[in-house]
Amino acid sequence: RLRPSSHSPTFSHRTLYTTPKSIMPEAQSVQVFGKKKTATACAFAKQGRGLIKVNGQPIENIEPECLRLKAFEPVLILGQDKFANLDIRIRVKGGGYTAQIYAIRSAIAKSIVAYYAKYVDESAKNELRATLLAYDRNLLVADPRRREPKKYGGRGARARFQKSYR
């Protein structure tokens, strides 16, 4: 036989599939969630060249157009130079389109703060955090409001059916 069989002492499954840690450098990355109502956006930020993608599409293509600026807010507040060496990939699902865009902006803001906390320094992170919180607290702190469940005796959570006496 030319190949070592899986029963021979020289063959090991580990030798085939694992690579030494020294060959593969550890990529600097953070994973963060942004939420709004039932929409969840998972942001994965790593070293790169300033790309921000949402579900594989560039952030410039977000629909509806009137809410596109909302998704850009963290970038516009902090300045593009902070995002120049970061690639952010966002997966978003659930909720409606407005809630999804609010989840995206929250995920972008949280991801840059987490990245700076982990790989840059604490004072830069605190500066970013203070700037974002001064603009809008919901960029970093999730909104706890949820939909109230419907009850019987009416068509909604609070509205009751009209009552007549005859």
Image: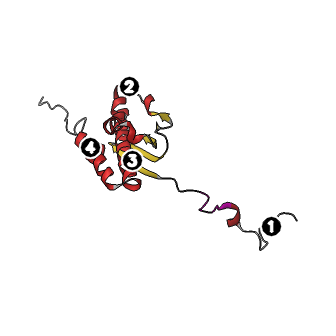
Q: Which residues are magenta?
A: 17-24
**Residue 148 seen:** no
The residue at which mark 3 appears reads as 111
Q: Nearer the viewer, mark 3 or mark 1?
A: 3
Report helix, strand or loop for mark 3: helix
Q: Residues within 10 Å of mark 2 (few under 14, many from 20)?
A: few
Q: Quadrant of the N terminus?
A: bottom right
Q: Could you tell me what secondary structure mostly forms the magenta stretch?
A: loop
The Cα–Cα distance between marks 4 and 3, rounded to whole angstroms, is 15 Å
Give the image quarter of residue 37. Answer: top left
Residue at position x 30%, y 43% in the image: 139
Give the image quarter of residue 74. Answer: top left
By what rule are the colours in the image chosen? secondary structure
User: What label sits on residue 145 in the rendered view?
Assistant: none
Residue 117 in the image: state x and y as whole percent. 36, 54
Q: Quadrant of the C terminus?
A: top left
Are the residues tagged 2 and 1 within 8 Å (C-beta)? no
The residue at which mark 1 appears reads as 5
Give the image quarter of residue 137. Answer: top left
The Cα–Cα distance between marks 2 and 1, rounded to whole angstroms, is 60 Å
Residue 92 in the image: state x and y as whole percent. 43, 41
User: What label sits on residue 65 in the rendered view?
Assistant: 2
Q: Nearer the viewer, mark 1 or mark 4?
A: 4
Task: Name the residue type under label 3.
Answer: Ser
The Cα–Cα distance between marks 1 and 4, rounded to whole angstroms, is 62 Å
